[in-house]
Image (cartoon, grey):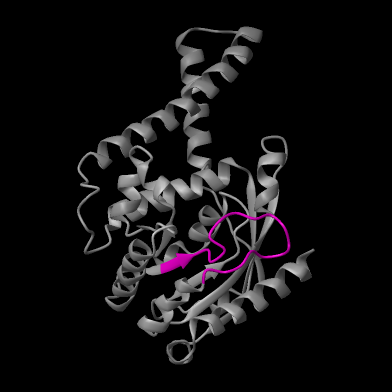
Amino acid sequence: MDRTERNGVLIPWFLLSAAAAVALCFLLSLRGWAFAGMLVVFFVAAFAAFWLLLALFVLVASRFIDPNKPVEHRSAFCAAIVNYVMALLVATARIRVHVEGDELVPAEQRFLVVCNHRSNFDPLVLGWVLRRFEVAFISKPENFKIPAVGRIIHQACFLPIDRENDRAALKTILAAIDLIKRGEVSIGVFPEGTRHAGTELLPFRNGAFKIAQRAGCPVLIAALTGTDEVRRRFPWRATDVRLRFVDVIDGARAAGMKTSEMGELARTCMTFALSAAS
């Protein structure tokens, strides 16, 4: 089934900004063109103020988090912040997300979701669509060094992976396996390892599939198209992004497969979905 994911997160911001702008104009007794001109100015200022307040809130909240302390349990508070910011960024970037095949998402158990990687918007779109399923992503270490953001995603069970250090990468894989086995989160991975906007997929790093193999969890295979167009079209035009869930490998089957076999199956499914979209 094909559906468009609804995102109304900016509506309260627009309404509050408009109300604040009108109130200021009346307080200053503005009339005519002065009222109309300053209404726009006050609206933009109020909207920017909401972003500033959100940034300050995240900054203050992050100060209570130790980024060096291993996370035993997912923080619902930090996960809520992550989901809200994802929704805001998707809405602000004017992304319309069309979803196919979400009946394949394993709703009753934790899973590993794998997807192709076209742009920095990929985890935002995928994470927002799957927000009800509590997905934490394996991400590059640089993201955990972003002020405030790094601490929040750390507490939401996101995991850094150093792809240049096999021992450190294995430690991340084992941590992801443990999180799934304990039912804390599902895990999201981009097996290409880096962004690539072409229809031809980069070679997969099949070590990611060891998470499903060792945890005995399902593998949800997804394909994204359109996210590489967002930067070119923003802010003047909206971008239609299509997220397809194309197949799922059940947990029992994943436990008995080689990681290379899972990688090849996922690659075949993604390639077919991307070819159909082009």
> Does 7 appear above or below 99?
above
* The C terminus - image quarter: bottom right
At 64% across and 64% down in the image, what residue appears? Answer: 202
**Where is residue 246 drawn, in percent x and y?**
63, 76
Residues 177 and 48: in front is 177
**Position of 54 compared to 65: left or right?**
right
Q: Is residue 232 above or below residue 268?
A: above
Residue visible at 39% across and 50% down? 141
Q: Is residue 124 left or right of 144 when viewed as pictured?
A: right
The image quadrant of residue 6 is bottom right
Task: Name the quadrant of the N terminus.
Answer: bottom right
The spot of residue 35 in percent (x, y) is 59, 12
Q: Is residue 76 above or below residue 105?
A: above
Q: Is residue 185 left or right of residue 233?
A: left
27 or 205: nearer the viewer? 205
Q: Is residue 139 above or below residue 14?
A: below
Q: Residue at x 20, y 47 (%)?
A: 66
Count up the numbered dots: 0
In the image, the segment drawn in magenta is 187-205
Q: Where does the image place residue 180, in percent across and percent down from the top left?
A: 34, 74
Main SS of the magenta segment?
Answer: loop
- Seen at 52% across and 69% down, the residue is 205
Q: Tell me if 66 is positioned left or right of 253 in this view.
A: left
User: For residue 169: magenta?
Assistant: no
Image coordinates for residue 259, horizontal then vertical, percent: 49, 81
Between 95 and 5, the one lying in front of the other is 95
Let me know if residue 197 is in the magenta part: yes
